[in-house]
Amino acid sequence: MAQNNWWRLLRRLLGLACIGMMAVTLAACSLDQFRSQAARVPRIVVSSLSDPKTFNLVTSDEASSSEILGYLYDGLLSTDGRTGELKPGLAESWEISPDQRRIVYTLRQGLKWSDGEPITVDDIVFTYNDIIFNDQIPSSLSDIFRIGEQGRFPTVRKLDERRVEFAAPEPFAPLLRFAGSSFLPKHALRQYVFSTGEDGRSRFLAAWGTNTNPQEIIGSGPYRLRSYQPGERVILERNPHYWRQDNQGRPQPYIDQVIFQIIESTDASLTQFRAGGLDVEGITPEYFALIKREEKRGNFTIYNGGPALSSSFLTFNLNTGRRNGKPVVDPIKSRWFNSVDFRRAVAHAIDRPTMINNIYQGLGVPQHSPIYIQSPFYLSPEQGLPTYEYDPERAKQLLLGAGFQYDAQNQLLDADGNRVRFTLLTNAGNKIREAMGTQIMQDLGKIGIRVDFQPIAFNTLIGRTSDTLDWDAVLLGLSGAGIEPDGGRNVWSPDGQLHFFNQKPGPGREPLEGRQVADWEAEIGRLYVRGGQELIDDKRKQIYAEAQKLVQEYVPMIFLVNPLALSAVRNHIEGVQFSALGGALWNIYELELSQN
């Protein structure tokens, strides 16, 4: 299941833990119902912190949809959730040309979609040429297939009934992994792709929304959609046409259903887990000691996968563009945010050690890089990565050197006498992130900056950061890019759909006038392009090392804490191979439930 991480591609803005509040009593109402049903149907019950926004693999841009879609689709290749190693998936084999520009995948025989229709090479060609490479269907997926400085797509063509060829216009190291991901059924979706709605846009953009009949959602993964009740649950059932079998010829998966209970706060979700209503639960640091004491009584095990493949950071809105003549950011604040010394000062003013000790209960490590620690391309501080240690006095010196000043009340003013004050947003319901925002407000108050901290609803936050662009600063997280750095290219490319600290409006969104891209910003984007073009790992490491140094030098994102990947899993689930990369259920197809 980890292969689907490559489809999620950072779009899971706000990462592993998000969102909202929901009454525990509401969750408890359905608990007895699921306990009684569980006696009849082998199932795993997990939580989702928000309703899915879509069941469309391509247009999904948030975490709750992505985690569900991971069960509905398989890729040409699969990924070992422990090591990241690529293995055969829907493709039984692949061949790479000597110049590493061409990859030919060979499909397994007899593959079927969840509705029983055959999976064909035509489905793959349709998914790429007619959807992902279609300018009328904007998605963050298209970003990762834009190769080189020109951003050209690979060509995808059918060789015969079982073989499909991907050919890159120039060397592109991640092509094998990215092209080996999931694809969609042509017979079910062509009607949407090749027609337009009243607004003149492709009907595919609205296809397979959450109001779609579940029987119309067709996939290739171990499960298919059975039902969705907004605000309550998503029920997945075994895909009877799934291709995997064990060594004894038994069809997989073994577990009949996977239930996503929609519980819009981490506290309420943990309450359900402790009451026996959930089988898997991510453990946040503030509750680790409590839950650890309950392991034996609750018949579960807490797994520690080391630093999680996720990031947490504060970022300022650096966008200098205008809409209808009005700046998207207050020009006074924009001057502060676009001062590199201002951003460096803020980075020095945040007390990460206290954040780790108090908020994360010691279950985290400082984060300094956009590339995860587990990646072979990570540059450590010992290898020359710049860091911003907690140093309020250094922060004040940077501010004074940049023309800021202090009044008699030790309040920070800019050179024109304006009080330095901005609004910091994050997603409501994530207790860790809310605590981090509160500490940041206090830390910056010590250097004279007034922060108005506002946790807001997830969908509202997404709308402001990607559509209206009406925000000062946000506290966010990203996850899902895996160990391949190119998975983050759509964050660091100035034209990427996740380049949100200086967002370029996507197709169909109201355009901007006067948006500027800084030289360092463009250079980071170029380095990510070069990193994908280079096929020799040692040279790729040098390129990504330079990119990491530039990110830390100009701090468009102020990285904070990398938490440990912690998850509690009921002991009746057999075959768990937990890791930070794959999580608890990456090998869902081979998990079984004991009779204990």
Image (cartoon, rainbow, N blue to C red):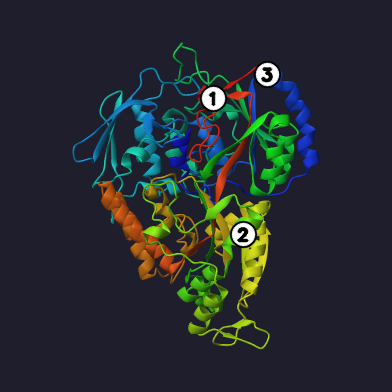
Quadrant of the rendering where the C terminus is positioned = top right
Q: Are marks 1 and 2 in contact (CB under 8 Å)?
A: no
Question: In front here: 246 or 195?
Answer: 246
Amino acid at the residue labelled 2:
Met
Q: Residue at x 49, y 58 (%)?
A: 509
Q: Earlier in the sequence, mark 3 or mark 2?
A: 2
**CA gap, disc 3 and disc 2:** 41 Å
Residue 35 relative to residue 60: left or right:
right
**Pointer 3: what residue?**
596
- Label 3–label 2 contact, CB within 8 A: no
- The x, y position of residue 549, in whole percent, is 38, 63
Could you tell me how far apart the alpha carbons at marks 1 and 3 are, in whole angstroms? Answer: 15 Å
Residue under pointer 1: 575
- The residue under label 2 is 355
Q: Is residue 46 left or right of residue 199?
A: right
Between 253 and 298, the one lying in front of the other is: 298
Q: At 66% from the left edge and 65% from the top edge, which residue is drawn?
A: 453
Give the CA distance from mark 1 to mark 2: 35 Å
Q: Is residue 473 above or below residue 216?
A: below
Using a 10 Å C-alpha cutoff, classify the residue at mark 3 as few (fewer than 14 neighbours), some (14 to 19) or many (20 or more).
few
Disc 3 residue type (three-letter): Asn
Measuring from the top left, give residue 205's x and y in whole percent.
50, 44
Q: Are marks 1 and 3 in contact (CB under 8 Å)?
A: no
**The one of 395 and 102 positioned closer to us in this rendering:** 395
Q: Residues within 10 Å of mark 1 (few under 14, many from 20)?
A: some
